[in-house]
Image (cartoon, rainbow, N blue to C red):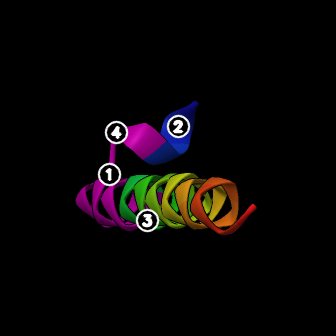
């Protein structure tokens, strides 16, 4: 993976990881809310 070597690729990778973590947290919270309402 050559994009990891450049600083620009590293920044993009960090943003991608941040977005993935955010989606996981949102899905986790929504599942907890759904369980509480049922």
Mark 3 falls on what kind of element? helix
Q: Which numbered disc, 2 or 3, marks the residue that appears first in the sequence?
A: 2
Estimate the spatial distance between the alpha carbons at disc 1 and disc 4, rounded to whole Å.
4 Å
Residue linked to disc 1: 6
Query: Mark 1 and mark 2 in contact (Cβ < 8 Å)?
Result: yes
Q: Earlier in the sequence, mark 4 or mark 3?
A: 4
Q: Is residue 5 magenta?
A: yes
Q: Nearer the viewer, mark 4 or mark 3?
A: 3
Indicate the position of residue 31 as horizontal and vertical percent values.
64, 55
| Residue 25 vertical position relative to residue 12 in the rendered view, above or below | above
**Could you tell me which quadrant the N terminus lies in?**
top right
Mark sitting on residue 5? 4
Would you say 9 lies left or right of 36 here? left
Residue at x-position 32% and y-position 51%: 6
Residue numbers of the magenta segment? 4-16
Circle 1 SS class: loop
Q: Are marks 3 and 1 in contact (CB under 8 Å)?
A: no
User: In 3D space, how far apart are the residues under numbered discs 2 and 1 (Cα atoms)?
Assistant: 8 Å
* Label 1 packing within 10 angstroms: few (<14), some (14-19), many (20+): few
Residue extending farthest to the right is 38
Which of the 4 image quarters holds residue 4?
top left
Residue 2: give its label.
2
Please tell me whether mark 4 sits on a helix, a strand or a loop: loop
**CB under 8 Å between callouts 1 and 4?**
yes
From the top left corner, tell me how far across and down residue 26 is, in percent: 52, 67
Q: Residue 33: where, in percent of width, then height?
A: 56, 66
Relative to the observer, which residue lies in front, 33 or 12? 33
Q: CA distance from mark 3 to mark 1?
A: 24 Å
- Reading the image, the residue beneath label 3 is 22
Q: Considering only order in the chain, which callout, 1 or 3, is on the residue closer to the N terminus?
A: 1
Q: Label 3 crowding class (10 Å Cα cut-off): few <14, some 14-19, many 20+?
A: few
């Amino acid at each position: 993976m050559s994009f990891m070597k450049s600083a620009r690729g590293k920044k993009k990778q960090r943003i991608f990881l941040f977005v993935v973590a955010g989606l996981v947290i949102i899905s986790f919270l929504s599942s907890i809310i759904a369980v509480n309402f049922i």
